[in-house]
Image: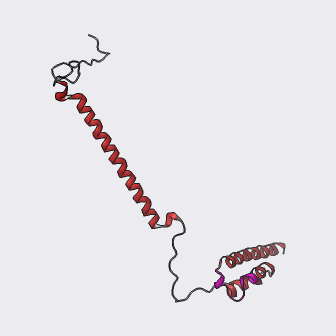
Amino acid sequence: MVRVFLLLVAAQVVLAALALIDCLSAEKHQVRAMPRAVWVPVLLLVPLIGPIAWFLAGRPAPARGGPRPAPRRPSAPDDDPDFLKSIADSARREDEEMFRRWEDDLRRREQDLRRERDPGPAAGGQRNPHDPDRADTPDRHTDPDQTA
């Protein structure tokens, strides 16, 4: 008999909690039969009958075939398509800027290497005789492991 009583008490507590949460989360104009300020004490003080009355008489009625409310805007930023698009656009612009800087740096380095290899007419058109890239001299870099 004690088990049945504990089961009924647990069911009443769960039912009261669900009814109270539903009552407090309903819009003020949607609560039926009594004002919300009256429903809360009824739900808390009248066991089993209070929550059952809330679900039968006080709960907002479901809309049947009437005009549907306008869809709500996403509540979290990661659910908002406009926000996600702005992030994607921002990332794309940053990537393009980074690639442009890399290309500029690569062009500058290539120009510097060309100037070092071929000084041009400013240096009299003569190459450095100790330059390892000269075509008329053998490769001066030898492997230290190979001894003659």
- Residue 54 is one of the magenta-drawn residues: no
- Residue 37 is one of the magenta-drawn residues: yes
Give the residue at the far right of this rendering: 2
Q: Position of residue 75 (x, y in %)?
A: 54, 69
Residue at image point 81% right, 80% down: 45
Q: Is residue 91 above or below residue 118?
A: below
The C terminus, quarter of image: top left
Q: Position of residue 117 (x, y in %)?
A: 22, 28
Image quadrant of residue 2? Answer: bottom right
The colour scheme used to paint the residues is secondary structure
Seen from the viewer's position, the closer of residues 108 and 132 is 108
The N terminus, quarter of image: bottom right
Q: Position of residue 23 (x, y in %)?
A: 69, 79
Seen from the viewer's position, the closer of residues 53 and 12 is 53
Q: Is residue 27 left or right of residue 65?
A: right
Give the residue at the far top of this rendering: 148
How many numbered marks have been drawn onto this rendered protein structure? Answer: 0
Residue at image point 25% right, 36% down: 111
Give the residue at the far front of this rendering: 122
Q: Is residue 107 above or below residue 71?
A: above
Magenta range is 27-39
Seen from the viewer's position, the closer of residues 20 and 130 is 130
Image quadrant of residue 107? Answer: top left
Q: Is residue 91 left or right of residue 122?
A: right
Q: Is residue 41 left or right of residue 21?
A: right
Seen from the viewer's position, the closer of residues 56 and 129 is 129
Q: Is residue 49 above or below residue 77?
A: below
Q: Is residue 73 above or below residue 110?
A: below
Residue at image point 64% right, 80% down: 27
Q: Position of residue 46 (x, y in %)?
A: 80, 82
Q: Is residue 39 left or right of residue 122?
A: right
